[in-house]
Image (tube, grey):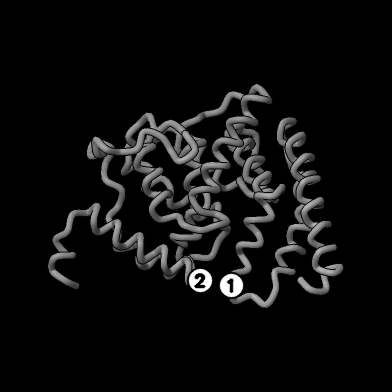
Amino acid sequence: MNSRLDVATPGIRRGWLRCLAAVLLGLGFAGSAVAAIMAKDPAPPPASRVSATAPKATATGIPLNTPWKVKIYELAHGTFLHPAWGWQHSERDYRMALRLARDDHLKIDKDALFAAAFLHDMAAFRPCKKKMPHGKCAALQSPSILKKVGFPMQKVAIVQQAEIGHMFYSNPGKDPTAIVLHDADSLDFLGDIGAARMISLTGAKAPSFAPAIKTLRNFLKEIPPRLITKAAKRIGKKRAAELKAFLDTLQKESYDGRAM
């Protein structure tokens, strides 16, 4: 490699590697290929080394009021790049989970929720060597990452439980933090946002997006009954109706699905 790049600052090196990772994802390369590239990326620096120019909030306005949150956000925003389960999905999950906790008067750990929301799908970009559910993989990898950035490690078990139980078909247990992340993640499969996420997965080389539509139809049956909080059930009903209306219109506009 060019000696100038070898001696470049970590920030410049990270920026170059992240650009390359984004290109690979855009071309359809697997998460494992991107993970191999990003393995060259230096680990998140300790909390004490956060730059004075670090962001004060996320793209949607989530406060980054501790150094470790800045580093986790920078990790997600810089390397978790995907239209269906990238950093944008994490932002939506976190904000929705807060809303569910507020509406149901649940006492949650916001630190653990932030960490779990931004790391729960990290296995798509940094897969484990052994095949396992991606939530479990995230739970195995998160502690070392969180320790490096200065996360309060007495809360890491809450993070891991939330990561393991975040999928709609999973059991989040009884911890309120895990429950609201489970419901928030489930809701992100419904509504217009759910449709956008699933259709994005088909890619430019797919002959049709019909398989994604079939999956979305199944979500209408499978997800609403699995929502736990009262607020999620209420929002889920609205989003299910929204998604069904979209799918029904699409069915008509594609000549009863024959030209989809």
Q: Residue 122's spot in the image, x, y percent?
A: 48, 54
Q: Secondary structure at mark 2?
A: loop
Q: Which residue is painted at 64% across and 37% down in the image?
A: 179
**What number of labels is visible?**
2
- Which mark, by number, is residue 28? 2
78 sits left or right of 96 in the view:
left
- Which mark, by number, is residue 204? 1
Q: Quadrant of the C terminus?
A: bottom right
Q: Which residue is painted at 70% across and 64% down in the image?
A: 212
Instruction: Note whether residue 157 is visible.
Output: no
Front in this rendered view, residue 149 or 84: 84
- Which mark, by number, is residue 34? none
As drawn, 179 above or below 196 = above
Mark 1 Cα within 10 Å, few/some/many (few <14, many 20+)?
Answer: few
How far is mark 1 from mark 2, CA to CA? Answer: 9 Å
Instruction: Note whether residue 120 is visible.
Output: yes
Dots 1, 2 in contact, CB < 8 A: yes
243 sits left or right of 127 in the view:
right
Query: For the view shown, which residue lies furthest in the top direction?
Result: 105
| Quarter of the image where one finds residue 181 | top right
Q: Which residue is painted at 65% across and 49% down in the image?
A: 193
Q: Which residue is painted at 69% across and 55% down in the image?
A: 195
